[in-house]
């Protein structure tokens, strides 16, 4: 009797196991077995909304470049080779103002060309066409020292200031403030800070 | 005879432990289940949706910081309470949308996310307790349609009044690891 009882229990257990195995085989594989590679993975933790406060991402602030704006029509380069051919001993100083539209504005009296009128006129005609990106205004001084063996062009932009409408948190970087052909950047010195 | 009974008992015990071992054991993931909870820190998100009532939603995104910045420029001299009031008034006036407009706005966000699979967006939903949950479900189901699943979301209970009573609302300049600067809007409770 006991033997038949035990046998019955074992038989019932075997039936249950077989039934379970049959049910497992009908399940999708993901529900049956976790691949070893997945077992090691940590569940991804999403960002939690903090309860102390919220910080909402704003727009990216891109720096602006104050430089010669070649996209504007009429901007002409100063040809250094021609200038040297005309007057290789000239030293010309141009004191101008950059206005709100980015134009370089100066009068004839602002061009110091004592004894070197031809070179002075060439430089004046070229500089009158120069236009800048409208991010800074103020005085700017150009010194053209043709006989120099070191720095031949000096651009003093240290008194330029950002325009009022440009927010303080937007950085303004100084780019190339001269448009001269036939001269390398090592022969030019720019003075002035990016903001 | 006794030996047979003993063997039967052994079999019964064996079967019992075999069955319990296979049917009761939990999966590895259940054993190590991690349930994160909100922390008492500043939360960060790209978009905050504050359900005002059943017909209006306050949608705060990257344009909100400019709105606040304009108010700060105009009336920055106000006391902090009045400044907060002015800021919230400007945000509610400029950033509230009707609930009927919400699906289109969410679809636009989903399209933006689909066009930028590398970007990850986090949307924070603030909903008053008394509002029906199906409103939240509608929003979440739309956000979940992003092709690259790069829109994440979080839901918290909260009302517009709680935002209005925030200790401080202001814009802050932050710089990320790549050196990119952003003007974020910070609401400090």
Image (tube, rainbow, N blue to C red):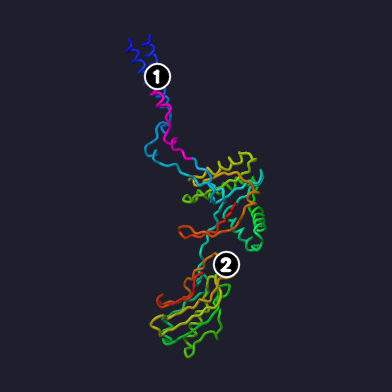
Q: For mark 1, does the 10 Å Cα neighbourhood hold few (<14), some (14 to 19), or many (20 or more) residues?
A: some
Q: Which residues are magenta?
A: B15-34
Chain to which mark 1 belongs = A
Relative to A25, residue A150 above or below: below
- Residue B115's place in the image compared with A70, above or below, is above
Q: Secondary structure at mark 2?
A: loop
Overall secondary structure of the magenta section:
helix
Please state the horizontal and vertical placement of residue B53, each as a whole percent of the image: 66, 44
Describe the element under mark 1 as helix, strand or loop.
helix
For the N terminus of chain A, the quadrant is: top left
Residue under pointer 1: A13
The verdict on residue A157 being magenta is no
Q: Earlier in the sequence, mark 1 or mark 2?
A: 1
Q: Evaluate whether label 1 is on the same chain as label 2.
A: yes
Residue A77: horizontal and vertical position, in percent? 47, 76
Q: Which residue occupies the extreme front position in the image?
A: B2
CB atoms at circles 1 and 2 under 8 Å apart? Answer: no
> Along the line of sight, which residue is nearer the eye, A79 or B109?
B109
Residue under the image location 55 percent in, 81 percent down: A106
In the image shown, does B134 or B41 lie closer to the viewer? B41
Residue at 40% over, 23% down: B19
Q: Which mark is residue A166?
A: 2
Give the number of callouts: 2
- Name the foreground residue: B94 vs A120: B94
Question: Is B26 colored magenta in this rendering?
Answer: yes
Marks 1, 2: nearer the viewer:
1
Left/right placement of residue B89 relative to residue B175 reads: right
Q: In the rendering, at what x and y percent does residue B83 appear?
A: 65, 58
Q: Using the image, name the chain to which the residue with label 2 belongs.
A: A
């Amino acid at each position: 009797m006991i033997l038949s009882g035990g046998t019955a229990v074992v038989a019932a257990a075997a039936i249950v196991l077989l039934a379970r195995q049959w049910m497992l085989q009908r399940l999708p594989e993901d529900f049956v077995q976790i691949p070893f590679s997945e077992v090691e993975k940590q569940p991804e933790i999403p960002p939690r909304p903090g309860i102390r406060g919220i910080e909402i991402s704003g727009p990216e602030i891109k720096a602006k470049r104050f430089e010669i704006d070649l996209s504007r029509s009429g901007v002409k380069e100063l040809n250094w080779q021609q200038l040297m051919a005309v007057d290789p001993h000239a030293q010309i100083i141009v004191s101008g103002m950059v206005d709100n539209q980015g134009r370089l504005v100066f009068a004839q009296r602002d061009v110091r060309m004592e004894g070197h009128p031809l070179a002075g006129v060439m430089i004046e005609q070229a500089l009158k066409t120069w236009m800048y990106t409208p991010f800074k205004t103020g005085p700017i001084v150009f010194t053209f020292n043709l006989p120099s063996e070191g720095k031949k062009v000096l651009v003093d932009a240290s008194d330029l200031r950002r325009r009022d409408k440009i927010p303080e948190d937007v950085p303004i970087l100084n780019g190339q403030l001269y448009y001269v052909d036939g001269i390398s950047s090592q022969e030019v010195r720019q003075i002035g800070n990016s903001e | 005879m006794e030996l047979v009974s003993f063997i039967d008992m052994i079999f019964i015990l064996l079967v019992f432990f075999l069955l319990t071992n296979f049917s009761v054991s939990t999966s590895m993931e259940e054993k190590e289940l991690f349930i994160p909870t909100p922390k008492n820190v500043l939360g960060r998100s790209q978009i905050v949706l504050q359900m005002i009532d059943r017909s209006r939603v306050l949608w705060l995104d990257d344009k909100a910081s400019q709105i606040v910045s304009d108010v700060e420029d105009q009336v920055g001299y106000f006391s902090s309470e009045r400044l907060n009031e002015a800021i919230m008034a400007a945000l509610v006036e400029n950033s509230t949308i009707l609930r009927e407009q919400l699906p289109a706005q969410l679809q636009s966000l989903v399209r933006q996310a689909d066009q930028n699979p590398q970007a990850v967006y986090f949307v924070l939903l603030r909903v008053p307790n008394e509002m029906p949950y199906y409103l939240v479900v509608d929003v979440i189901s739309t956000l979940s349609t992003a092709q690259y699943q790069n829109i994440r979301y979080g839901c918290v209970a909260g009302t517009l009044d709680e935002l209005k009573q925030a200790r401080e609302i202001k814009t802050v300049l932050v710089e990320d690891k790549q050196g990119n600067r952003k003007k974020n809007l910070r609401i400090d409770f």
